[in-house]
Amino acid sequence: MPPEPLTRFAPSPTGYLHLGHAFSALTAWSRPGRCLLRIEDIDSARCRPEFEAAIFEDLHWLGLDWPQPVLRQSQRRDAYADALGRLVAHGVCYPCRCTRAEIRAALSAPQEGVLPGPYPGTCRERSMDEAGRGDAIRLDLARALALTGPIGFAEAGPLHIGHQTANPAHMTEGLGDVILARRDIGTSYHLAVVVDDAAQGITEIVRGEDLFDVTPLHRVLQILLDYPAPTYYHHRLIRDRNGRRLAKRDDDRAIRRFRAEGATPQALATLVGFSFPA
Ligand code: GLU
C-alpha cells in the first residue's frame, strides 16, 4: 500500500503571513490527502510568539485546519544533531570558521553585502576532529555527489512537468558547499527541513518556486540519510506591482491587513488567482 498522501505548510514566525503565504497555504491544503502545519522557528533571534499566534489566526480565517500537535523546529535540536552526525559519518562534512567578510574577500565580491557565489572552499580540507564551538559545519558537495550519484526528483507542480534531473555543475556553481549547521543554532534550513519532512512522513512537498533550485540539494541529504523520496510541487510566486517576490516586510500585503479591511477569504483567494477545487 502506498503511504497516505501528506503535505505540509511550513512558515517561519518572523513576520506576518502575506498574500504569497495565502496562495501557498491554499495550494497545499487543496492537494490530495492531509496537510500538516509546521512552525519553522530555528532562528530564535528572529522568531516571535506574536507572529506564531498570527499564523494560526490567519490560517483559520482562511478556513484551514490542521492536525495537532503542531511540530515546532525549535524543539527538534536532538533530531538535527543526530542527522548531522550521520552525515559526518559519511565523510561529507567539514568545519568552517570563515566569516562572511573573509568569504567575500576570497571571492573578491564586487558588491558590499552580497555574496557573489558559493563558498570558495577555504576550510574544505579541515577535519571534523578539529571542529570547535566557533565553527559552522558545511557539506562537501562534490564528495556528497560522488556518493549519491545522479540526482533527480518527481515534480507534480504546474511549472515543471514530470521528473526533474539535476545538473551537478549547476549545483556546484549555484549552491556549492552549503552550511548544514550554523555556529549559533547548530542546524540550518536545509538540514531541518529535510529531517522534519522525513520524520513527519510528508509525501508531497508544496512550496514556492524560489526553492526549486535547492531541491536537488535536499535530495542529496535525503539519499545520504536514507530517507524516502517525496514528490515536489513548486508553485508560482505572488509578486508585487514591480514584479518582486513578496517579503515579510511588505506589511500592506499582509493577510491581517486585508482581514482588518473587511476582505473575505474568497476575495483574497481571487486576488492571488487561486480557485478552490470544485
Ligand atoms: N519555512 C520556509 C518559509 O517560510 C518554507 C520552507 C519550505 O516549504 O520548504 O519560506
Image (cartoon, grey):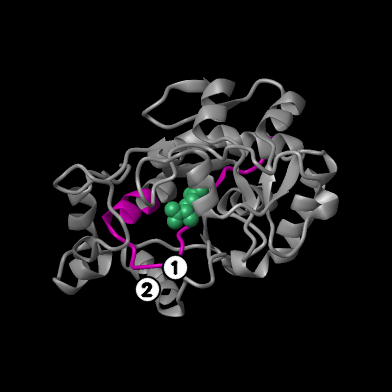
Q: x%, y% of residue 77?
A: 70, 65
Q: Secondary structure at mark 2?
A: helix
Where is 133 relative to 31, above or below?
below
Q: Which percent across, then down, holds residue 212?
A: 46, 35
Q: Residues within 10 Å of mark 1 (few under 14, many from 20)?
A: many
Residue for point 51% across, 24% down: 170
Instruction: From the viewer's side, name the closer residue of 78 and 204.
Output: 78
Left or right, residue 202 beside residue 268: right
Give the residue number, with chain letter if any, for mark 1. Answer: 13
Say above or below: 61 vs 150. Answer: below
28 in the magenta segment: no
If the image is split into quadrants, where does the C terminus sit? top left
The range drawn in magenta is 1-25
| Label 1 with label 2: CB-CB less than 8 Å | yes
Percent x, y for residue 230? Answer: 61, 37
The answer for how far apart the CA atoms under marks 1 and 2 are is: 9 Å
Query: Does the stretch in magenta take in 6?
Result: yes
Which amino acid type is shown beneath numbered disc 1?
Answer: Pro
* Disc 2: which residue: 54
How many marks can you see?
Answer: 2
Single out the mark in the foreground, 1 or 2. 1
Q: Residue at x 40, y 73 (%)?
A: 51
Give the x, y percent position of residue 17: 34, 63
The amino acid type found where label 2 is placed reads Ala
Give the residue at x 25% y 64%: 254
* Residue visible at 47% across and 43% down in the picture: 206
